[in-house]
Amino acid sequence: MNNRRSFFQLLSEKPWEQSQITEDNNHNGKTLNLTKANLGVRSIITVNCIFFSLFIVAYADRMFIHDWQTIPKPLLLWLNTFVLFLSSIFFHKAKVYSDLQEFQKVKISLSVIGFLSALFIVGQLIVWKKLMNLGYFFNSNIANSYFYLFTTLHVMHLLGGLFFWKNITFKIFYKNYTMLNIQSSIKLCAMYWHFLFLVWLVLFGLMLNS
Amino acid sequence: MSEDYNKFKLEAKSSEMLNDENTSSIKIQDTESEVPEQDLYHPKSFITKWIFCQDAKVIGIQYSITAIAIGLVALVLSWLMRLQLGFPETFSYLTPAGYYQFVTMHGMIMVVYLLTALFLGGFGNFLIPLMVGARDMVFPYVNMISYWMYFIAVIVLVSSFFVPGGPTGAGWTLYPPQAITSGTPGSNGGIALMLISLSLFVIGFTMGGLNYIVTILQGRTRGMTLMRMPLTIWGIFTATVLAMLAFPALIVACIMMTLDSLLGTSFFMPSMVQMGEHLKYGGGSPILFQHLFWFFGHPEVYIVALPAFGIVSDLISVHARKNIFGYRMMVWAIVIIGALSFFVWAHHMYVSGMNPWFGFFFATTTLIIAVPTAIKVYNWVLTLWRGNIRLNIPMLFSLAFIITFVNGGITGLFLGNVIVDVPLSDTYFVVAHFHMVMGIAPILVIFGGIYHWYPLITGRFLHEGMGKFHFWVSFLGSYAIYFPMHYLGFIGVPRRYYEMYNSPYIPTSAQGLNAFITVAALIVGFAQLVFLYNIISSIRLGKIAEKNPWQACSLEWQTEYVPPRHGNFGKKLPIVYRWAYDFSVPGAKQDYIPQNVPPSEVPEARTEKT
Amino acid sequence: MIVAIIFFLVVVGSVVFHIFTPWWWTPIASNWGGIDDTIVLTFWITGLVFIAIGLFVVYCVWKFKYQKDRRSEYKPEDSKLEFRLTLITTLGVAALLAPGLIVWNTFVTVPKDAYEIEVLANQWSWSYRLPGKDGKLGKTDIKNINDKNPFGINKEDKNGGDDILVQNGPLHLLINRPVKVLLRSTDVLHNFYIPQFRAKMDMLPGSVTYYWFEPTRLGEFEVLCAEFCGTGHYAMKGKVIVDKKINYNNWLAQQTTYVQSLAKVNANIKQVVKLTK
């Protein structure tokens, strides 16, 4: 029953010894004190972390080569960042409200999140358009390539998140779903949203400083 | 049946809730997370039961069939290559471009689409829920998507044979710049399809891997601690963790190279002059791709090897009627090998032109990894010591695995030692080494595993005579192919050569050896056809197997029905009272005690003493 | 019984094959005997392990064959034995690694008296550039490459003018003199490999890699490309001739420098222009 053992303690158990057998027979078959969905989302976030860090490593390796030409960062990018930040805040609020079971407020927050996310995506597209008008195309310099690649990948991950946001919103508006279940879904979705905001901060920060 | 199933599902759940009584927080969270699973279950028609199926066992079989089917393509490609190498004058149907395309496709199919998919997708899906005592994977729907992503990846891969220019011929390592420039076959459509297919594979695999990890960590039955799991599960679990951490490197490399190839960016492409023409690329680093590729590529070796280690441990233990020797050490070795495998990748790049001083670091880490690997070998052979060895076909394959694995592992010590790698890299020594250690050895385990679990899947045994024929030809034949091949490497015969012509330093007898290898390869290939026939015909004609025919302890044999039905176990999930290796316990009447037998039923057995 | 015998034959057969094999190293022609020695040492250590494990398996299969009335020993683990085995393995691995790293250290440390030459690879041929009278190679850049300047020599660099260019010809090397080969590629990855010299290294477009060796045997040797480089990879061969000082100097005197080759090309062009007029 004791789930709090460290990994190393766990691995040094001798499962054939009588004392250990008595202890093990009461084990509930879970290693971590998390729901399955929670562990699932955490795993996905871990994989994503590696995915983006490898891109960052590649970027850092490349940015010191002499042919690097910095791409301008329009003011709109800062605005987009703020919009994404707001959507993250609202997701936090949605989570708090759902814990308090104030589902009317949850509905409002979720709607705002949808609006803000759409705004963010449109904003990113406008940034693209602006840059292209200025002559910064995808393959004209490697810095541009990275900029377009990073923004695309980030938006794609956001779209993935919006898929789950859509499921939750649909359920809460049209289906009388069990409260416990929707609470945990909102919590996990909020976690992912904060993660995506962090990813954007890191990528944006990196691109500003190169 | 589904009604029945729902009933016992509900009952089982209530019993699960009882289990969780003392941790109330878990109880609540758990019930909520299980609710949606219920809706997903009913297979209503043929399509939902056998095609878009969410039962991990069926998905495992789907994975296996697809993997074996695409593996057969790779087998045929290897014959065509071998004919060219063994009898260059007789068979002149193959152009150099065709040869390189076949080499590339053979390698990529075998490593990724056959071995990875079969071990994790096939064995993993079939065995994980059964062995940890779960009704199914925790996210069955995602699991189904995972298989279909894999299927599409395979289709995209195959479609590259039919685009203008054919499939890519850049070697399975796909090094830029040559992979996407015009001097290499398949540099137009072929390489792009290959990269897309790999990306799809990675996405699909990540979904599957999510299932394996969460099921093993959180979905086990009552009493199943981590240290009571069979080593098969440990192997698959660690391999999945490695895959989840290593595959991002592959997909990152694939994305960037696809863009280089299709949109003309220069992530990996340096300035270059090809055939007197300045290309528009510039500034990219080919070495960066190699780092990314091998950061995936080396763990990939262990993604294949660790499940094989796990499975073979269980086969040896069951058929030697003895607990696996040094279980804890075996688990540690798996975990340590997994962790170390992320610090050795550049040993594939000793002569790549990277900073030569890296050689010191990577040679050291590489040779350190030999220590836990050697311990695994010792423990396998020590399990045989004073065992009661039944020479069933799975056992024969396990013994053959030990010999080939030791042989291939040892040549790894040559190549890992940086200075020895200098003359041997890019020669046939490397080809022989990796075929022995990650081709033949894991495939022998796959065969052993299929002979072992076939009675569980179908309720019948595979034909014994054909099995013995298959075993001896495969083992002795493949050994005869790859053991002498090392010596071609000593001569200095480089790999990836369409033809050697008459290089003055290569003795003419080497051509004789090449011809011999080709003949052996054709014979071994033929034996695989016998094996396939055996698999298909035994579904109906095989000898009927009683329940738990090998008298194993682990849970997959303790299901209510054989073959296990949807939901795996009976009305109640089994409760585990012991580790998976209670063979020949002193005092017990039988020489095995299944994991779900409570101590009260075997009062005479004393399990004390270490 | 039969199983044990066949496995025994496999183990013993491998050893016998190793002893009597007709296929072995191409005789060495450089200073890298240390590499061969390390391989021999590795063979001894790992060979003993292979034989020991193989024979142990054979013994177990023969001795502990299934009998109905017999039980296996019940012994989950033996920490002492496992510790000892770990220790022995670690020592064995260290014994392989230490000499290997020592030889690697000499491999990556180029001696000061080594003379430099450059090997330039492209799909699918080899060219060579040797420093002229000033003893220095001129700077290069892939961007400078054109028909007149196949090596991409930087025109502003004074050292480049007298560089000796060897295209389509065999490369000559001095016997018993350490040489540092600088490796360049204009298009894709290649690898400059001569089996008798043991050493090899990839060539990367955009950077210069290197290794060094000392030819110790006179004669003609074949150059191979050892990194897959496209359809013509298998046919990318060249020749290296190891010479005594006199022959080497004779050969060197016959080669053209960069400036001379430029003049020749210009003359040719003028001729062509004349003819077309």
Image (cartoon, rainbow, N blue to C red):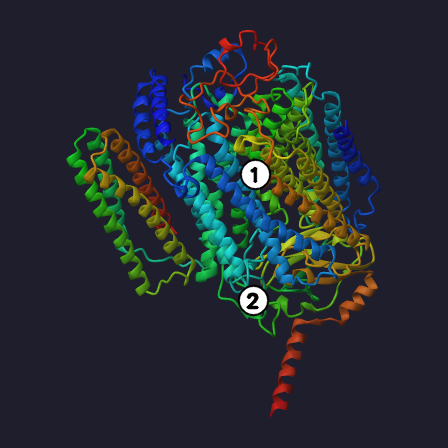
Q: Position of residue B106 (x, y in %)?
A: 60, 51
Secondary element at tag 2: strand
Q: On the rendered structure, is A131 left or right of B599?
A: left
Residue in the foreground of this view, choosing between B182 and B111: B111
Q: Position of residue A115 (x, y in %)?
A: 21, 47
Q: Position of residue B103 (x, y in %)?
A: 62, 54
Work out whether residue A45 can be spotted: no
Work out whether residue B379 can be spotted: yes
**Badge 2: how crowded within 10 Å, few (<14), some, or many (20+)?**
many
Q: Indicate which disc, 1 or 2, sits on the residue closer to the N terminus.
A: 2
Furthest residue toward front: B541
Q: Chain of mark 2?
A: B
- Give the residue type at disc 2: Val
Q: Quadrant of the N terminus of chain B?
A: top left
Q: Quadrant of residue B303?
A: top right
- Give the residue type at disc 1: Val
Secondary element at tag 1: helix
Q: Position of residue C243 (x, y in %)?
A: 81, 61
Against C272, residue B153 (above or below) is above
Furthest residue toward left: A104
**Badge 1: how crowded within 10 Å, few (<14), some, or many (20+)?**
many
Against B430, residue C133 (above or below) is below
Numbered badge on residue B304: 1
Residue in the foreground of this view, choosing between C221 and B168: B168
Circle 2 residue: B273
Q: On the rendered structure, is B526 left or right of B457?
A: right
Q: Quadrant of the C terminus of chain B?
A: top right
Residue at image point 33% right, 50% down: A155
